[in-house]
Amino acid sequence: MASSQYGLLGPGPGALGPEQLEKLRDFKIQARIANEKYLRTHKEVELLLSGFFREMFLKRPDNILEFAADYFTDPRLPNKIHMQLIKENKAT
């Protein structure tokens, strides 16, 4: 039995062909581009995540899930983000 890039048994029944792999690669590239454009136009996403990570590393909670739930459901969070956006816009 000849060995191939797929091993001794050949490709599995769900393996993608070369054309499908190329389409998948193109899709992934386009998705990354779209995600990057979205993040560049929504600065609040960066502020939300960087604020969360900053607080998490400062407080180092034992229960990360509970900490994350509390952080992202804090009723003051939208105002904090809004104020940070204003502050950054004034700086530029």
Image (cartoon, helix red, strand yellow):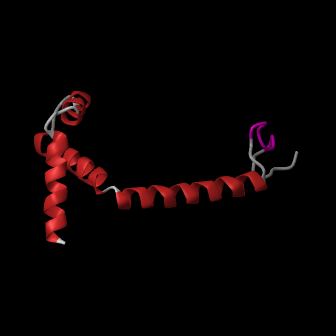
Q: Is residue 81 left or right of residue 1?
A: left
Name the dominant secondary structure of the magenta segment. Answer: loop
Q: Where residue 24 appears, x then y in whole percent?
A: 66, 52
Q: Nearer the viewer, residue 60 or 42?
A: 42
Q: Is residue 5 left or right of residue 66?
A: right
Quarter of the image holding residue 39? bottom left
Q: Which residues are magenta?
A: 8-14
Quarter of the image holding residue 25? bottom right
| Residue sitting at the far bottom | 92
| Residue sitting at the far right | 1
Quadrant placement of the N terminus: top right
Quadrant placement of the C terminus: bottom left
Q: Is residue 76 left or right of residue 31?
A: left
Q: Is residue 10 magenta?
A: yes
- Which residue is depicted at the point 14% across and 67% down? 90
Q: Nearer the viewer, residue 47 or 3?
A: 47
On screen, residue 9 above or below 51: above
